[in-house]
Image: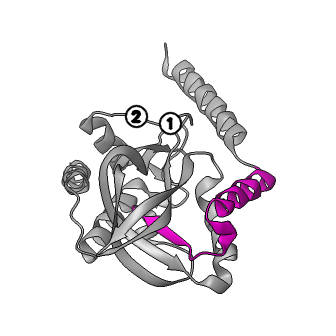
Amino acid sequence: MDDLAARAVKDTIAAFDRIKLESERMSPEQLQASLEKMLKEHGDGKDPIWIFGYGSLMWNPEFDFHVRRVATVHGYHRKFCLWSRINRGTPDKPGLVLTLERGGSCRGLAYRLTPATSRDQLSRLWTREMSMGSYIPRWLECRSGEETFEALAFVVNRSCTGYAGKLPMDTMVQAIATAHGKYGPCADYLFNTEAALHQHGIRDEHVCQLVQRVRAHMRG
């Protein structure tokens, strides 16, 4: 196959991927219904609302909060297993971003929303995290020191087309080091996450290993 034909095939595949992406996008009505369902599971918004951040929510939460704590959830772990075909990559060259996968535990940041504005903050968060159907919202038991409380976390939706599953390290490094989306390089997402973990005294060996490998790849 010559270069022109190969490029045509690649463009066709990318076009179909874009169609798939749009088909997965949730409507404003679907987003609102999903949010209301989660609020009803947690006292319809009357109880204090905590958000658990393990990736970009640690360094770019984009919501108002009045308490922030280092916290742990059990039963899930932080993992780069979600293809990013818009924000940190493209359909033909996707990046990888974090989600929560079953098994193990995860240390991150828990935020308690400001009561007066919690519903508005959640609506904005829902648009950011839930629009493409990549995550499933869950109320998880969260522990911070001696305190235990429920926190809302976004875990992976294994049924979405962006689910990458278990990938070889070399594949992960290649994707993160080279992909670029509308929010910038995928590598920046990784580096910002490592910086936030370090700032709050959280050690994640997998993230540290990826940072070392990605930096080495980018240096050539």
- Describe residue 62's horizontal placement relative to residue 19 as left or right: left
Query: To which residue does mark 1 refer?
Result: 158
| Among numbered discs 2 and 1, the one appearing first in the sequence | 1
Report the front residue among 116 and 89.
Answer: 116
Report the front residue among 8 and 66.
Answer: 66
Query: To which residue does mark 2 refer?
Result: 165
> Dot 1: within a 10 Å radius of its alpha carbon, few (fewer than 14), some, or many (20 or more) residues?
some
Q: Are marks 2 and 1 in contact (CB under 8 Å)?
A: yes
Q: Position of residue 3 (x, y in %)?
A: 49, 22
Query: Which of the two marks, 2 or 1, is nearer to us in this view?
Result: 1
- Looking at numbered disc 1 in the image, what kind of residue is underneath it? Arg
Q: Residue at x 66, y 75 (%)?
A: 46
When asked about the image quadrant of residue 25, the answer is: top right
- Describe residue 6's horizontal placement relative to residue 192 as left or right: right
> In this picture, which residue range is highlighted in magenta?
27-54
Give yes or no for residue 194 being in the magenta stretch.
Answer: no
Q: Secondary structure at mark 1?
A: loop
